[in-house]
Image: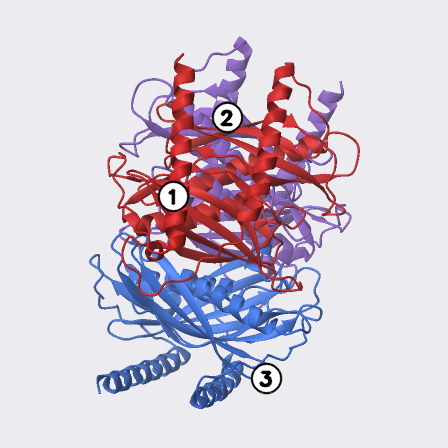
Chain colours: A purple, B red, C blue
């Protein structure tokens, strides 16, 4: 579809959240279709996890986004989908890869939303494809367990914070979950949640550096808990780490099923977003360093540094590999 | 894309206007891409005309719309695009053709919006394709001239109208044209206009028969005049004709360029929409007959009858042809 | 326009904010048109104030909203518009008055956004209309000065609040001002701001009483400061008073012009919203009493009680008057 002014920031760069939402919609369609391809109980595919994704080049207003999706692995109860987003300037014909993303879906019965159904197996062209898929499956399963434990943290308000501290830029929004945010099962689309997360992370980043900012990457996101129509969700973000030219922001999504439900507020999703600051010519700018004050902030900064160095090392390894 | 609750009426049937908007977006993308495929002045394709289109089967919430577009003819200054919409139930895998539409676009220069550029010619597989296209081109050119003359009519308000008269169901809405309604040139997307027209026509039809109604077809629509960002548009509709099971509604779009422009209000578009009334089981219901009062209303009713009989005859001819 | 699922809460009642937004759009169109009706500098009418408005009867999904607007007074630099909203059930034909609102607009030059232009005078049918209008004009002018002084308050966060305290239900959201939120001048439409304010107030009310809630009335709202495209706005609300069957919520709007602007965060708007809690059958329910803890909270509760009793007395006086 064509990117409109509302999909973009004032500098004309399309929000990462808009792209994440398109990716998830494509993934939900292809995996729901696949899981219903054999006779059996009708189901809807629910997003369980998105792997880390890099935004390779910014998309602009007036460009057309082409989204293509493919099922690349199936386990007994889950589907791996790889989605590619190309941006096309229809005036010049130029095309660029904007994103590649990997998503995991789980089929939930339309009759009983808590029942996970079996996934019809796919055919692999080569045996290695199945083995590699299985390896990816095992890795993400492990990672999902880990984040589930980390998920207890809460963002506390800070009175009169100093510039460039964590408290200065931390932000949160509330959103009432309406019908058009939801799937047929009455639960929020993963893509809607990711769009709100990117919105909050973007505001945190802009508050910190007061320039035009764009999403550079999103770490793996795990969707541990479903969010129902009518909930109020609180999306909060705080900066955890800055390198010379990037900022890492941690985002939490909490759901409040406050009408007609005995249940307490719960943590539904959490993730790390990385942003860069851009000059008017679109070049990366240096970022003001984050001032950490408490022990927790210093610990999170070190953890963020760890993730940053790990990603950098991985990327260099990949570049050497592809250069060979 | 997946059809959401906001795309549909209370009975779950997707608004014809939503489908028309998707069709037009696909048409605008493919024709803009084609017109920029050769080196030369960059341009944006503007919708000039949509041929009559029938809504073959209603689409529902949760279904996925697949839109495919193809360029089928080019004249010196215009492009013909044929668009096909398939609805797919991703739970059952069932696919149906919902619509086929033919649209005409004209490339306008990005630098000078009043300059119509030349269209790169397409290659035809068979010579007859070019000849048939040329015939369609000549026919629509003639028809555009005719509607331009008809366009002077105005819908006047009626005080205390009786049920089933023209005045009883006539309706209008105003809309302030914002940035996300517009193309790169700052003019309203044809699809946005058609969606508003379908909304008004649907209200006229529902007021008349007080049941669940759906768009059955739209007559050819000619876009004589562009509508600029910042305009207020008034979309008004009145019923012109009823058969046993269908209603014809005439819709006018008037633009008021009230800021920054010395220009008077002008008629931008007009069209006829046909609606049917559906029972809860989705079967067509008989429609209350339209009570005509004035001479003009009686004349319009006869003209509507003419169009109705003509369409019916054409359809029967086509069915006989395809049965042979 | 037809009310859609996203315009309403889970019980199907249309959000007061959606109605306020439609009212403001109608007011902006009619006053911009009027202010441009004479030769002179082109201008856009900006919302300066909305008088107190009561929501007389709830509107539901599938109903059609009819909005009509009329200019009722002009001073040298401002326009008074009265807007009436009728809800129409198009299946039964039943119509009800939903709202009557009075709005004040000021014409700002398109060339120089800080220049207020002169308003062409309107003709009054009777001399008394002009005198009454002048009285309303003087009254609102006084009230605007008063709120400007009150506007300094800030909502501080509370850690681990008890149920039914002020801190327990207080809420805030942030919103990045995008192109479609704005007028031609690049400033937020007053209606967009009011819709966000109603959203926050509704969440405060729902958090307090955990039932289905609807907007009953909105106190006069003054728009002291414009909000520019690209700002982040923080909308925060806290409960100030509860009667047996109603809740009063104070809402603040703060703007952060954080990109490309040296300016500090500033208070743009503030207002009081009144909500009632409804049973599944749509009857008003008793409301849990607000627990006030600090001196400030107790003072605000008393002030809210004052406003509540004043409004009640006014309404009784009006009912006696109309009964005579």
Residue B114 location, x and y as percent? Answer: 72, 47
What is the chain identity of the residue bearing mark 2?
A: A
Of marks 1 and 3, the one in the foreground: 1
Q: Which residue bears the numbered disc 3?
A: C76
Q: Quadrant of the C terminus of chain C?
A: bottom left
The residue beneath circle 1 is B302
Residue under numbered circle 2: A81
Residue B280 quadrant = top left
Secondary structure beneath dot 2 equals strand
Q: Chain of mark 1?
A: B
Q: Position of residue A54 (x, y in %)?
A: 63, 35
Q: Is residue C164 visible?
A: no
Q: Position of residue C90 (x, y in %)?
A: 30, 54
> Which is more toward the observer, A99 or B311?
B311
Q: CA distance from mark 1 to mark 3?
A: 53 Å
Dot 1, how many residues are within 10 Å of its Cα: few (below 14), some (14-19), or many (20+)? some
- Residue at 45% across, 70% down: C69
Please identify the quarter of the rendering in which residue B90 is found. Answer: top left
- Element at label 1: helix
Q: Are marks 3 and 2 on the same chain?
A: no
- Front residue of B195 and A92: B195
Q: Nearer the viewer, residue B216 or A280?
A: B216
Given contact means CB atoms under 8 Å apart, are the residues at marks 2 and 1 in contact? Answer: no
Residue C95 visible in rendering? yes
| Pointer 3 local density, CA inside 10 Å: few below 14, some 14–19, many at least 20 | few
């Amino acid at each position: 579809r064509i990117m409109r002014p509302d999909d973009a920031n004032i500098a004309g760069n399309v929000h990462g959240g808009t792209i994440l939402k398109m990716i998830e919609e494509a993934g939900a369609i292809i995996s729901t279709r696949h899981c219903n391809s054999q006779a059996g109980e009708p189901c809807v595919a629910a997003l369980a996890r998105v792997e880390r994704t890099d935004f390779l080049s910014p998309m602009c207003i007036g460009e057309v986004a082409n989204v293509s999706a493919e099922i690349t692995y199936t386990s007994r109860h889950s589907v791996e989908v790889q989605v590619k987003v190309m941006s096309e300037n229809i005036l010049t014909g130029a095309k660029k890869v904007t994103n590649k993303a990997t998503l995991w879906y789980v089929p939930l019965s339309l009759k009983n939303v808590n029942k996970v159904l079996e996934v019809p197996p796919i055919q692999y062209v080569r045996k290695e494809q199945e083995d590699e898929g299985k390896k990816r499956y095992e890795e993400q399963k492990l990672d999902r367990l880990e984040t589930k434990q980390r998920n207890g943290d809460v963002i506390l308000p800070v009175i009169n914070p100093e510039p460039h501290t964590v408290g200065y830029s931390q932000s949160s929004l509330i959103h009432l979950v309406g019908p058009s945010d939801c799937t047929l099962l009455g639960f929020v689309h993963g893509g809607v949640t990711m769009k709100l997360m990117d919105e909050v992370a973007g505001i945190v980043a802009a508050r910190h550096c007061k320039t035009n900012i764009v999403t550079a990457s999103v770490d793996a996101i795990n969707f541990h808990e479903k969010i129902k129509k009518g909930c109020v969700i609180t999306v909060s973000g705080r900066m955890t780490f800055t390198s010379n030219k990037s900022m890492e922001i941690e985002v939490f999504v909490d759901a409040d099923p406050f009408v007609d439900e005995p249940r307490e507020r719960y943590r539904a999703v959490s993730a790390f977003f990385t942003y860069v600051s851009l000059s008017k010519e679109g070049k990366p700018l240096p970022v003001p360093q984050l001032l950490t004050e408490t022990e927790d902030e210093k610990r999170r900064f070190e953890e963020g540094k760890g993730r940053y160095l790990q990603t950098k090392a991985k990327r260099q390894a990949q570049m050497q590999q592809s250069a060979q």
